[in-house]
Amino acid sequence: MALLTLIGAWIAPHWAPIQASSWAPPQNPGLVGVFKPNQALAAIVLEDVGPAPEHVACDAEGTLYTSLDGGTVLQRPVDGAWTPVGTTEGRPLGLRPDEQGGLWIADSIRGLLHMDAAGNTEVLADSLAGEPLRFVDDLDIDQNGRIWFSDASQRFDYTQVALDFYEGSRTGRLLRYDPITRQTDVMMRDLFFANGVTLGPDDAYVLVNETGMGRVHRLWLKGPQAGQRDIFVDQLPGTPDNIRFDGQDTFWIAMPSLREGIDALASLPRLRTLLSLLPIPLLEAAAQPASFVIGVNLDGAVVHNLQDQGNPFHYITGVTPCGNKLYLGSLKTQAIGILPRP
């Protein structure tokens, strides 16, 4: 056994795909208090759309959009059926309607895109300072038409998500694209998997989820705090994925898994390095999928806690308020979930 340990310790650093580093995770409160388990998500109604609809978008008229593994983008008018709009030929994740029948798209493979109502796609940004954007994840549009979007990792792409968490090198960024100058700027860096992005009331600030640390960052854009950043929500028991503002007083956050597994390995870089030699599907199997959605108010306090940990509709990656309903996306299903809005 001692010999095998020595061999493993020598092989791992030389052949492993990661350069693991330690981190100190924020306190994990667990499923207690405001996060106490319940069955609020038992009321989910499923609507089949296709493989891995990660997110749902809604325009001002109530038309819904989602995207599938393989690149297809779908549209569903109010009381209509889902029909293809086009394909990005990549892996579209975050979606925002342009109010002209088209979409702004965060495509993890192809970059920041725009798709018009006819399905024609234009690449807006796929590199920065000569380096390719490896993992464009989510986006939002401010009142000036600038696109705020996340680059989850500079180390790994969409097919290697688990490796980013096993490495823990924190290379995620919040970026901003200006369609007039066609310039992309770094607005926040050193995030442990930068994920969901949403603007707050009157574009006073922008929020970005840091999935690996179970928290939400805020960058102030207006007022006396403009240019400063702080933590908007901290110590979440799950891994925050997408976040959406309802335009009034609530931010909806989807948490596809719980944090225990990630936290337990935080101080064990050698073990993570050795484990990273395993096939990625085995690494992903260590995650703890959850059916977990929360709503927080303008002060970052939890006001809605929606769970159902026994629900087969799990690994919820996006939650979008639209009318009197919430629309849920997941990377592990063939359907979107629909729930009455609390």
Image (cartoon, helix red, strand yellow):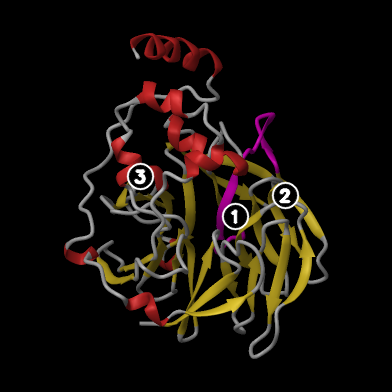
Q: Label 1 neighbourhood size at 10 Å, few (<14), some (14-19), many (20+)?
A: some
Residue 90 seen in this snapshot: yes
Kind of residue indicated by mark 3:
Gln
Kind of residue indicated by mark 1:
Ile
Q: Name above or below for residue 95 compared with residue 272.
A: below
On whether residue 14 falls in the magenta region, the answer is: no
Q: Name above or below for residue 162 compared with residue 105.
A: above
Which segment is the magenta one?
A: 126-146
Circle nearer the viewer, 1 or 3: 1
Pick whichever of labels 1 and 3 is earlier in the sequence: 1
Q: Are marks 2 and 3 in contact (CB under 8 Å)?
A: no
Give the image quarter of residue 114.
bottom right
Q: Label 2 belongs to which residue?
A: 124
Residue 187 seen in this snapshot: no
Give me the residue at 35% from left, 41% from top. 262
Pick whichever of labels 2 and 3 is earlier in the sequence: 2
Query: What residue occupies the far left of the structure in this picture?
Result: 33
Front residue of this view, candidates 3 and 203:
3
On whether residue 135 falls in the magenta region, the answer is: yes
Circle nearer the viewer, 2 or 3: 2
